[in-house]
Image (cartoon, helix red, strand yellow):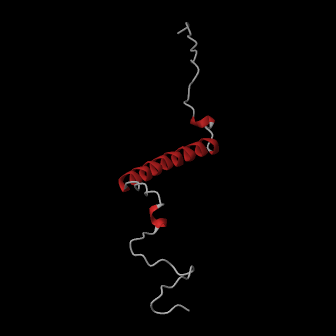
């Protein structure tokens, strides 16, 4: 065991040099900038708008399939009536 006048030479003791920096923090790449909240909001609104349009399209398609046009829904057309004229009057 070394005395008070001799430096300790244990290899498992960590270095106590205060000028030494931790290298793990230096190795990290810089963090990319976050996406602005305004862009997130616009993307969300566009998604909602598209979803609403698709929901309307689905409802219209199902209504067309389920409610097929009936013969009574067609406009009524009559054949030209032929009138017989009597000449004996």
Residue 54, above or below 17: above
Which is nearer the eye, 17 or 77? Answer: 17
Pinpoint residue 32: horizontal percent, then vertical percent. 43, 54
Q: In which quarter of the image is the N terminus?
A: bottom right
Pinpoint residue 35: horizontal percent, then vertical percent. 41, 54
Which is nearer the eye, 76 or 3? Answer: 3
Which is nearer the eye, 89 or 60? Answer: 60
Residue at the extreme left of the image, as rendered: 38
Residue depicted at x 52% and y 90%:
2
Pinpoint residue 44: horizontal percent, then vertical percent. 44, 53
Residue 59, above or below 4: above
Which is nearer the eye, 43 or 4? Answer: 4
Q: Is residue 37 left or right of residue 64?
A: left
Pinpoint residue 57: horizontal percent, then vertical percent. 54, 43
Residue at the extreme top of the image, as rendered: 87
Q: Is residue 82 left or right of residue 3?
A: right
Residue 34, above or below 63: below
Q: In which quarter of the image is residue 31?
A: bottom left
Residue depicted at x 45% and y 69%:
22
**How many numbered marks does the figure carry?**
0
């Amino acid at each position: 065991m070394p005395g008070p006048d001799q430096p300790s030479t244990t290899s498992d003791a960590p270095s106590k040099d205060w000028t030494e920096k931790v290298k793990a923090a230096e190795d990290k790449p810089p963090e990319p900038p976050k996406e602005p909240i305004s862009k997130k909001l616009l993307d969300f609104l566009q998604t909602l708008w598209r979803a609403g349009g698709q929901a309307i399209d689905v409802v219209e398609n199902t209504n067309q399939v389920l409610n097929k046009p009936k013969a009574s829904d067609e406009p009524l057309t009559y054949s030209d009536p032929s009138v017989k004229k009597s000449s004996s009057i």
